[in-house]
Amino acid sequence: MSADEYRRGRKVERERQQKDRRARGRYRGILPVIYAIGFVIFTAVSLFIGPQPAFAVYLVTHLFYAGLIRADINSLRSQGIDWGFSRHLWFGSAFALPFVVPAYYVYSKRVLRRENESRGITD
């Protein structure tokens, strides 16, 4: 018998269920699609309209990317994956830097693979 068998409550049940479930990023799958759409819109606006509207498109799309990354990290944290302080860096850099979304996509894939392997779940 393990010590967990005598513990009761919703938190204990969630811990047991989380160990058996695969960790998945809720918004991770749509990040490349949104990134590609934003890149096409930014390119079209900068070529045909001008630099000022292109900068507005850049700001809006990167705000959207930062929000998606923040929501994805929060969903991963609710599944028991610890991000530490780097979650703030991913959010801030997604707002300011252009190639953070592909970097986050690759990094979160590594984190998810590592977490699923530690849970004993393979692809």
Image (tube, rainbow, N blue to C red):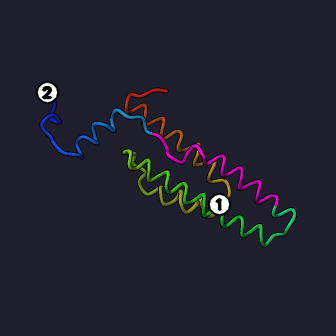
Residue ID at (66%, 66%): 60
Image quarter of residue 55: bottom right
Mark 2 and mark 1 in contact (Cβ < 8 Å)? Answer: no
As helix, strand or loop, the secondary structure at mark 2 comes to: loop
Q: Is residue 87 above or below residue 8?
A: below
Which residue in the protein does label 2 denote? 1
* Residue in front for this viewpoint, 53 or 93: 53
- Of the residues tagged 1 and 2, which is closer to the observer? 2
Q: Label 1: few (<14), some or many (≥20) within 10 Å?
A: few
Image quarter of residue 41: bottom right
Please provide the residue range marked out in magenta: 24-44
As drawn, which residue projects farthest toward the right?
48
Residue ID at (36%, 45%): 80
**Cα separation between marks 1 and 2:** 52 Å
Counting labels gives 2
Q: In this view, does 113 lie above or below 96?
A: above
Q: Which label sits on residue 97?
A: 1
Q: In this view, does 93 lie above or below 7?
A: below
Q: Which label sits on residue 114?
A: none
Residue ID at (24%, 46%): 11
Q: Label 2: few (<14), some or many (≥20) within 10 Å?
A: few
Residue 35 place in picture, x, y as percent:
67, 51
Residue 72 place in picture, x, y as percent:
50, 51
As drawn, which residue projects farthest toward the front?
10
Q: Quadrant of the N terminus?
A: top left
Q: Which amino acid does label 2 sit on?
A: Met
In reply to whether residue 38 is colored magenta, the answer given is yes
Q: In this view, does 49 lie above or below 14?
A: below
Residue 57 place in picture, x, y as percent:
72, 65
Q: Which amino acid does label 1 sit on?
A: Leu
Residue 113 place in picture, x, y as percent:
48, 35
As helix, strand or loop, the secondary structure at mark 1 comes to: loop
